[in-house]
Every structure is written in structure tokens, then in C-alpha cells.
Image: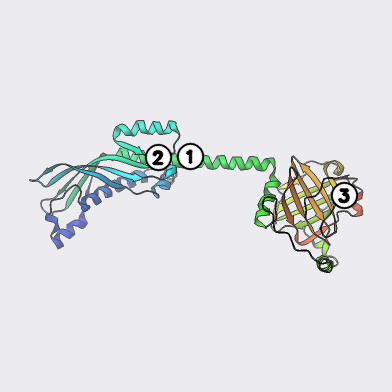
Amino acid sequence: MRKTLMSGACAAAAVLAGCGSKTPTCADAETVSLVKQIYQQQFDKQHKDMSEERQKRVQFTVKDTAVTLENITTDASNPDTGKAMCSAQLTTVLPEDAVKAEPQMEQYMRAIYERQGAVLEGTKLRGNVEYTAQRTEDTGVLQVALSGFMPFMGYFHDIAMDRYDRMLRAQAAAKKSVEAQMSAAPSASMAEMEAETEGVPSESAPSAAAPQQSQATINEQIQAAQPVPGQTAAVPTLCSADETPVFACSTGKKRASLCMASSGSQLTYRLAPLDAAPEMVYPANAATASTAFKQGTHTGSTEQALPYVSFDKGNYRYVVYGRTTTEQGILVEQSGKRIADLHCQGERLSELGMSKMQSLSLNQDTRPLQLP
């Protein structure tokens, strides 16, 4: 392919400054500039003829590169006509991740383009080109004709397409891996994320021990946490109309509820983003509470007895604990190690340990609770 570009801007300069009479050389700044302009015009033309999707993929690498002209050589010069015949190399430096094609693809591209004069060395792409530079006799306008640039352009295009394709494959693989992990233990992953965003202490990043409080201070906190009459009924829950909430609270980003069926023999744990449908329901199918859940009591450093209900899912243990008048939260353990302790915020309720729970005949959970 061959393309000629007329420098109208230089024609104006020749009239005003008298520079148009100078015989051009291969390495003149004006000549080099026109060579790069010709290449860019041809690249834009090829780019415009592509589909929008292909344009987007190529542009992803174009924005990270710039084309220069190097190793300029004057092959011949005619003093009678003032015409210079030149050879050089179009070059560009590619991003590191653009030159990490699979071996088979790399060999394929090299086999096609190297024999045409386009070579990739490390991150630098080079392509041999030829051009002529000559001024018109009447106006002194500089004319440049460029040829041989298509192998360089084609190599760049294929590298850019391969880079984008590899990026898409990597993103798809990462998404699939995350989905597989979420499928194995969805709520554990969510709990870990909440633990990070809400500042919940974990074993991997233990928080500093809280200072000892006097019993009077503890009593004041308990009194302040007690709901006013009628407050319990106003606490939002994820329970259905024919279920009774025995535990409900918000952790700031999620809402959790433990609901008792009207039959009094079943419990269901639900977890959902605020104002959204539940993303975790346990058990998934109807099951007797005594086979799906356990109960226990934890006595912490404050000497307050915290009732709790737990269930196991794989090697994860989930626990809802506390009373409305005391500390209340959701604990997640993995293989006996605490990975999240999400504290309830704002409106909350808990009837764990109340008489209605006794009718469920839950087995005792004798494992220690990983709470301070």
C-alpha cells in the first residue's frame, strides 16, 4: 500500500519564510513528521473500517503507545530533482502485559510478520518502511510517499487483540473462581467482607483488648440498650407473616433473622442485604429444628450469660447470640477459628433462651464460643 501526503502547512511557511527552497533530507524534522502523519492516517482509516468491538479492543493498547521513526537511512538522493529515497523503522514500545502471548500464538504471529520485516524484541515492535521526500517545482510544497508499513500495523493489531482477549479470559477465570468459592461457603465470604468493612476483629488481625469496665458502667450500658415498650414489634425482620422472629438485627450492611415456624418445630436463618431479598437461607429445605440447630450459653468477661443458637454448614459454624438487653451479634467460625464477629446495630431483638425456645428441644452445643 502506498499513500502520499501533501504538507499544506509547510507551503504557507515557504511563502512567508522562504524555507520551501531547501532540499529535503530523510531525517528532516518536517519529513519525519509527515511520515508519522501518513502512518497515523492509514492506521485511523483501517481502524475506522473495523467493527466497534474490534475498535475498542485495539484502542485499549493504542492509548498506551506512541509510534516513532528510528534508524533512518538515506538510500539515494537525486541532486537534479531534489528527491531523497529513504528507509527507516517504525517503532513503538508496548506495555509489559501486551507481549505475554501464549507460546503458540507468539510463534504464529512471528511466522507471519518477521518475514515481512516486522519484529518484536522484548516490548519493542519494529517495522521496516521506505519513503521518498521531494518538493514540488512550482510551489516548493514537500511531498512524502510512504510504503511498507502494513506488516508493522498488522503485527500491532494482532498483539493488541491478543492482549485484550487474554484480559477477558483472565477476568472470566477470576469470576468463576470467586463464584466457586462463594458456592462452597457463601455467607462465610460475606462475613469476612463485612468484618473488613465494619472493623470487626478477627483472628488474623486481632484488635486491642478493651479496657476493663466497672460493673456500674456495664449496668448503665445495659439500661441504655433496653428497648422502650413496643419497640420489639417495630424491629424489621426477614420472617414471613406466619413465622415468629426469635432473633433479628442489622449489622449495618446486612440484616439477619432467625424465624420460628407457626408449628413451633422449625427454625429458619436468613441473611440479606438491607432492603433486598435473602441471599442465604438455612436450612434450604424444611427440617426439624432439633436436627438443624443447636443451642448453648456463653459467659464472657462481663459475667453476662449470652444465650446462642448455632448451626453448621460444611466446616463453617454460624452463631447468633445475645439478648435484646445485652450484647447481640452474629459469629462465623471456620474449622474452629473465628473469622467474623458482626455486632448488631440499632433496632434489634432476641428471644434466645426464652421459654418458647425450650419447645424446640435443641441439642446442646458444647463447643466453646470464640467470643472475648
The Cα–Cα distance between marks 3 and 1, rounded to whole angstroms, is 54 Å
Across and down, in percent, residue 111 comes to: 35, 30
Q: Earlier in the sequence, mark 2 or mark 1?
A: 2
Which residue is rendered at x = 37% and y = 48% of the image?
A: 65
Which quarter of the image is occupied by the C terminus?
Answer: bottom right
Measured in 3D between alpha carbons, the distance from the residue under mark 2 to the one under mark 3, in whole angstroms, is 64 Å
Q: Which residue is mark 2?
A: 159
In space, the residues marked 2 and 1 are separated at their CA atoms by 11 Å
Looking at the rendered structure, the kind of residue marked 1 is Arg
Q: Secondary structure at mark 1?
A: helix
The amino acid type of the residue labelled 2 equals Ile
Residue annotated with mark 3: 262
Q: Residue at x 67, y 58 (%)?
A: 199
On the image, numbered disc 1 is attached to which residue? 166
The x and y percentages for residue 314 are: 74, 39
Classify 341 as above or below 127: below
50 and 101: which one is in front? 101
Query: Is label 2 in contact with label 3 (beta carbons under 8 Å)?
Result: no
Task: Tell me the element at label 3.
Answer: loop
Considering only order in the chain, which callout, 1 or 3, is on the residue closer to the N terminus? 1
Q: Is residue 37 left or right of residue 248?
A: left
Write the residue at 77% across / 47% down.
318
Badge 3: residue crowd in 10 Å (few <14, some 14–19, many ≥20): few
The disc labelled 3 sits on which kind of residue? Ser
Callout 2: SS = helix
Instruction: Give the position of the N terminus as an image quadrant.
Output: top left
Q: Is residue 95 above or below residue 108?
A: below
| Closer to us: 349 or 203 | 203
Q: Are marks 2 and 1 in contact (CB under 8 Å)?
A: no
